[in-house]
Image (tube, rainbow, N blue to C red):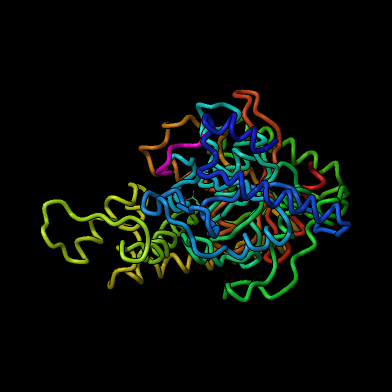
């Protein structure tokens, strides 16, 4: 049924870059046979899933939304893909994304934008717009996303779905094409908090192949999501993440959700995180710095596209690299490589990257202080509802500001979850509420999400 729906709707939505009907049907048949033989299977066995094209899938092309990886077929599976296979989830295919996960609208994909199922002229968020649109349009019940600055949570918000960024290190990054290694985290996209929790438990947990993986059991998020009572829970509204700059309808739905939390027994407090005002500036130094280093591997020698410079008879390796990277990378990727290379260059390192790392510490301390006053923190996930395709494409700053509320969690490594809190009066489009919890306490955000849902 899902494959039929993909055939019917994907030509319009462009949520999937690759569909693996054969592989998905084979897994489904295998699950059916094992179930018929009386085997007890993992609880998501047979539930199809879409995977963001940032995760390596053996035998299935993986592009990260970039021309430079067009046609590249990974020789191995990412750990999370292995876990999905072991749990019996048929993989429907790979979903569209901003090139190398840089963006908030999926317009930076080399393979064309994904459209928002709520309004086809609007963006589905980014970078994981393909996964969010697939889930929202019922092309897949579950999807995998990656969140470096909001790429799971913001697409969830603007497509009326659920997305969670686990604690940094909670889910393996092995086999995930790296954007910014100290910020990247893999997580679930779903239509309900419980579905997200079920997927979280399948993909989460220690992996010796990822040196930053947390060596502890996955938090009991499924059990937490069944929670309906918030009596005595202290919920903190982050002053810096509400009010000015947030669309009226977004703020209105957020205020209603706060009221619902109060009715469920929560105690609402206001907390201030003064250094969040510098989060954006710090993020756009740390991310480009790490990305420029990570993307150095796309040198036309080891992977993907190789182009010879025009009019040069026997080009040097350096000339081939230059021509290939020029042809293979889009504008946003080039912008960030230039920014990151500059910030890391000798003489500037302390002034830019070093300063940004200090701000990062201050933001983590703001969170520590806030979590003394509250068990979880909340804010709108994104400042506006889905904007029109093309509206922010020429204005990088306007694009970057979509992640103002999601970026602090990545800088501090804490978990965050976005779930729907209704649609606005002014445009009828979905709004998301974000719940943040201290590191390794992912179950708390699922408990609040479960109660709100
Ligand atoms: N939109 C943010 C960026 O462009 C976040 C990206 C992400 O989380 N992968 O960097």
- Please say whether residue 113 is one of the residues in the magenta stretch: yes
Residue 422 in view, yes or no: yes
- Please say whether residue 351 is one of the residues in the magenta stretch: no
Q: Is residue 185 left or right of residue 353?
A: right
Count of number-bearing discs: 0
Q: Is residue 5 left or right of residue 148?
A: right
Highlighted range, magenta:
108-114
Q: Is residue 85 left or right of residue 124?
A: right
Q: Is residue 411 above or below residue 163?
A: below
Split into 4 quadrants, where in the image is the C terminus? top right
Q: Is residue 440 above or below residue 139?
A: below
Q: In the rendering, at what x and y percent does residue 77 appear?
A: 57, 63
Residue 163 in view, yes or no: no
Q: Which of 312 and 58 lies nearest the eye of the viewer?
A: 58
Split into 4 quadrants, where in the image is the N terminus? top right
Q: Quadrant of residue 111?
A: top left
Q: Is residue 328 left or right of residue 357?
A: left
Q: In the rendering, at what x and y percent does residue 195 appear?
A: 75, 48
Residue positioned 33% across, 55% down in the render? 305
């Amino acid at each position: 049924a899902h494959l039929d729906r993909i055939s019917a709707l994907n030509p319009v939505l462009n949520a999937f870059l690759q569909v693996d009907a054969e592989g998905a049907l084979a897994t489904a048949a295998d699950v059916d046979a094992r179930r018929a033989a009386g085997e007890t299977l993992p609880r998501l066995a047979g539930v199809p899933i879409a995977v963001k094209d940032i995760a390596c899938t053996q035998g299935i092309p993986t592009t990260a939304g970039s021309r430079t990886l067009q046609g590249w077929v990974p020789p191995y599976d990412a750990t999370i893909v292995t876990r999905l296979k072991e749990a019996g989830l048929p993989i429907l295919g790979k979903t569209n994304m901003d090139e190398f996960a840089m963006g908030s609208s999926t317009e930076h994909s080399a393979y064309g934008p994904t459209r928002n199922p709520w309004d086809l002229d609007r963006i589905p968020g980014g970078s994981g717009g393909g996964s969010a649109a697939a889930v929202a349009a019922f092309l897949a019940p579950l999807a995998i996303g990656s969140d470096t600055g909001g790429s799971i949570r913001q697409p969830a918000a603007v497509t009326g779905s659920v997305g969670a960024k686990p604690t940094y290190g909670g889910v393996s990054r092995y086999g995930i094409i790296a954007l910014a290694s100290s910020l990247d985290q893999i997580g679930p996209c779903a239509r309900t908090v419980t579905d997200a929790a079920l997927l979280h438990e399948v993909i989460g947990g220690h992996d010796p192949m990822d040196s930053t993986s947390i060596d502890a059991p996955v938090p009991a998020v499924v059990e937490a999501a069944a929670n309906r009572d918030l009596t005595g829970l202290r919920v903190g509204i982050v002053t810096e993440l509400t009010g000015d700059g947030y669309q009226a309808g977004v703020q209105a739905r957020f205020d209603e959700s706060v009221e619902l939390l109060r009715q469920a027994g929560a105690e609402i407090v206001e907390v201030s995180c003064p250094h969040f005002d510098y989060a954006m500036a710090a993020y756009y130094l740390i991310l480009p710095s790490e990305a420029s280093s990570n993307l150095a591997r796309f040198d036309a020698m080891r992977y993907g596209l190789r182009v010879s410079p025009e009019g040069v008879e026997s080009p040097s390796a350096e000339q081939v690299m230059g021509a290939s990277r020029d042809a293979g990378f889009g504008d946003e990727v080039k912008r960030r490589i230039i920014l990151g290379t500059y910030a890391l260059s000798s003489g500037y390192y302390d002034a830019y990257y070093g300063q940004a790392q200090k701000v990062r510490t201050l933001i983590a301390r703001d969170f520590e202080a806030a979590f003394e006053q509250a068990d979880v923190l909340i804010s709108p996930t994104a400042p506006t509802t889905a904007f029109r395709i093309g509206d922010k494409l020429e204005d990088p700053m306007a694009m970057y500001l979509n992640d103002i509320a999601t970026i602090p969690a990545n800088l501090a490594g804490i978990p965050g979850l976005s779930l729907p809190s209704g649609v606005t009066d002014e445009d009828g489009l979905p709004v998301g509420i974000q719940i943040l919890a201290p590191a390794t306490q992912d179950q708390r955000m699922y408990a609040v999400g479960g109660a709100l849902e």
